[in-house]
Amino acid sequence: MSVPVIEADQSGPNTSASTRGTPLRWMLIVAGVFALVSLVRILTGADDLTSAGALRAAIQAAVPITLAGLGGLWSERAGVVNIGLEGMMIMGALGGAYFTVEHGVVAGILGSILFGALTGTVHAVTTVIFGVDQIVSGVAINIISAGLAAFLAQAWFTGLEGGGPTQSPSLPRPPAITIGPLNDALNELSAKGWFVISDLASLLAALTRNLSLLTILAFVLVGVSGWILWRTAFGLRLRSVGESPSAAESLGVNVYFYKFFAVVMSGIFAGLGGVYLVLVSGPGYQNGLTGGLGYIGLAAMIFGNWRPGGLLIGAGLFGYTTAIRLRGGTIELHALLLVIAVVLIILALWQIYRGSVRRGLITGGIGVVFGVWFATTESVPAEFTGMAPYLATLFVLAFAAQKLRMPAADGQVYRKGSAG
Amino acid sequence: MRVVQKLLLGLAAPVLALLIAGALASILLAATGADVGAFWETLLKWPEPRNRVNIINSAAILYLSGVAAAVGFRMNLFNIGVEGQYRIGAFVAAVVAGQAFLPGALNTVFAILMAMVAGALWAGIAAVLRVTRGVSEVIATIMLNSIAGLLVGYLIKKVGVRTGNSISTKEIPESSWVSGIPAVPDAGGAEIYGLALLAVVVGIAYYVVITYTRFGFDVRATGASESAAVASGVNVKKMIIISMLISGAIAGLIGMPVLFGQAHNYGSSFQVGIGFSGIAVALLGRNNPAGIAAGALIFAFLSEQGNRLNILVGISPEIVSVTQGIIVLAVVIAYTLVRRYRRRLEQAAVASQLAPPTAGTDGKDGGPGQDPGDGPGNGPDAGPGDGPDLAKSPREEPVK
């Protein structure tokens, strides 16, 4: 049992050092990619790449992914793998819709928190208290939740005006912010088509019109989660449970409590992701409306190296590709190939410069493939764009595994008293 | 006597799980104001001949899916991707059979083999990522499931035939169809799929291989304790690849009975979710060939009977999938508790035999379970077998 302890000791300073260095670098990278997209927009005439409408859609698509990913982050940081995010999201969506129908939007959001927490509690009881395998529990929760949501939807929404056995009536929206004059000015600016400036204007325009309070809440929650998990004693203990539960227990940390708490929180975040789908993304609840978003959230979290900032970037990327696909822009999808090609080739040069020639060549090779794909075709099938989140995650796992560091005891069952 | 006791202990968990699931379903129904009595009456009514045929058919399909998952589970490998492998396999078989490169039955055999190859290769991606890059097969197969769905959707558009609003692969020539087995009298023309026999073949093969071959022994040994298996000379990486390929090949077979017995092409009407039900069935049956069969029959029975709930008593048939999910969860909890209880008994027995008066209190669990092939450089590896607590007694079947 001594091996994990040493590991945890080593990871302490490493983790904090990388936290200090990372944000600025990441911001520069994000800014660089933004400029690149802007350049590609001008070169290819794919105006919808950074239009305010596309960016607004991207933000809207990214929020549920972010919330699901946050759910995954909390749970996995405490060492519990949560495949059940998908089911927790469905339950949150159903609870949100039901309470919104009955008592309004605020009750709806609280209802989604309640339903998410209840589903999370099931996962917590089975995995933490009974010590059942976490994947198994997650799979079972997904089966139960999909069935239960559909069953309750039929019981609750049948006969309501505009509702039916498989869908809720259309629901009122939570309040949204629009800063009219500023938005108009920004729209004007973005219409000019200037390099970077117009794109930034579009981004701001997307944020100043019809920005749902729930969207703001989601981004605040990312920050709050990061702060709690990395800047408080509570968060340190929670993460220690995910790194080395036996070491944590020997220091007097109540391992079960932290794991339980984290998994319930995980359900709450996933539930909020669900309520976002019914209140903001769409008109209401529908059977199967999550459509794998829970898994994409999980992917975003892994893509983001089990960190809030990274998961935000992952969710942003996945949300963006989803939005572009749903808007049906063939030129835009095609132009994205060029963006990917350039990003990969720059990454390859960087890797070769840093000494990992083999990895650089692989990355560069993939980049060239994308470049050739861009040059030789006119359009990209929508299905391929749909695959992007999954493929990106697989590639990151396959080729950047050395850079990734999941919680050391993630997925392992811990029994009280194992610390000996 | 011991055998009887063991059998009773083994049966106690699933029976208890069924009762708990039934009770929870009743509570749920009562809470939503449904007629609980009518529900049970409809659900437990002895099925009509026609329904019996349906039950056998879907049980056969579920059984294939269950065995596919179980092959992985035996090795402590989580093939969550049965669903994706099934779709890829069914699609490939439909295309190959539709092209009819070979005449009649040869075409059928060839297409089935291609389905196995396609399923195996799809699963192989996850296996290679696991072995070479240390990528958790759970995450990889989840991603591959989604990719499979999209890929098949794309390819159908490319090679498919449009009839009205729906699109599907080219129809298989009639000479390659597999006719049904009219085993149930008075079923009104409903027949058991000819290829439902695949389930029997796969079940027997699974039993023989796992129980009597060197390979099966290695699989069980690796599943029970990877470090012990490595120490005794098992090449775990090779085993992971092979068992994942087998699992995928069996998953490729899942769609065959329907494809050759009923649908004759692959289209959007192909059932989804069988892969996940298969995982549930494998868990219910404790990865045991006969156990999976029992689980598949129970699940198929519930689903078939559930279909009538909506018409007869106005209850959403979804209550059945809720019940199925609860059964799985309850049974897994029960198995986990029983396993822990047994291990404590064994430990106590061994301790009392070995220990002189100064019996120590340590050695609660097995060793730290750190295996040499799993260094920190291997990256994310949520493989279920890594936890110290998962060290199991080799005499026992791994319960996942």
Image (tube, coloured by chain):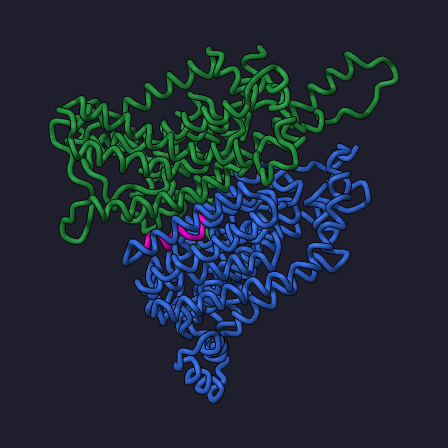
Chain colours: A blue, B green
Q: Position of residue B28 (x, y in %)?
A: 47, 49
Position of A75 relative to A114 (above/below) = above
Q: Position of residue A291 (x, y in %)?
A: 40, 53
Please, which residue is most extreme toward the bottom here? A181
Asked whether the viewer can see residue A97, the reply is no
Q: Quadrant of the C terminus of chain B?
A: top right
The answer to which of A363 and B297 lies nearer the viewer is A363
Please, which residue is most extreme toward the right here? B358
Instruction: Tell me which secondary structure the magenta stretch mostly adopts.
Output: helix
Position of A207 relative to A386 (above/below) = below
Residue B289 part of the magenta-drawn span: no
Residue at 41 percent across and 39 percent down: it is B276
Residue at 74 percent across and 34 percent down: it is A3
Q: Quadrant of the N terminus of chain B?
A: top right
Asked whether the viewer can see residue A324, the reply is yes
Q: How many marks?
A: 0
Answer left or right for B378 relative to B276.
Answer: right
Residue at 59 percent across and 40 percent down: it is B380
Answer left or right for B178 relative to B71.
Answer: left
The answer to which of B239 and B255 lies nearer the viewer is B239
* Chain part drawn in magenta: A382-391
Answer left or right for B189 relative to A166.
Answer: left
Q: Quarter-wise, where is residue A131 in the image?
A: top right
Q: Position of residue A199 (x, y in %)?
A: 45, 74
Residue A385 part of the magenta-drawn span: yes
Q: Position of residue B174 (x, y in %)?
A: 11, 30
Q: Quarter-wise, where is residue A380 in the image?
A: bottom left
Residue at 26 percent across and 27 percent down: it is B112
Position of A394 relative to B175 (above/below) = below
The answer to which of A252 and A389 lies nearer the viewer is A389
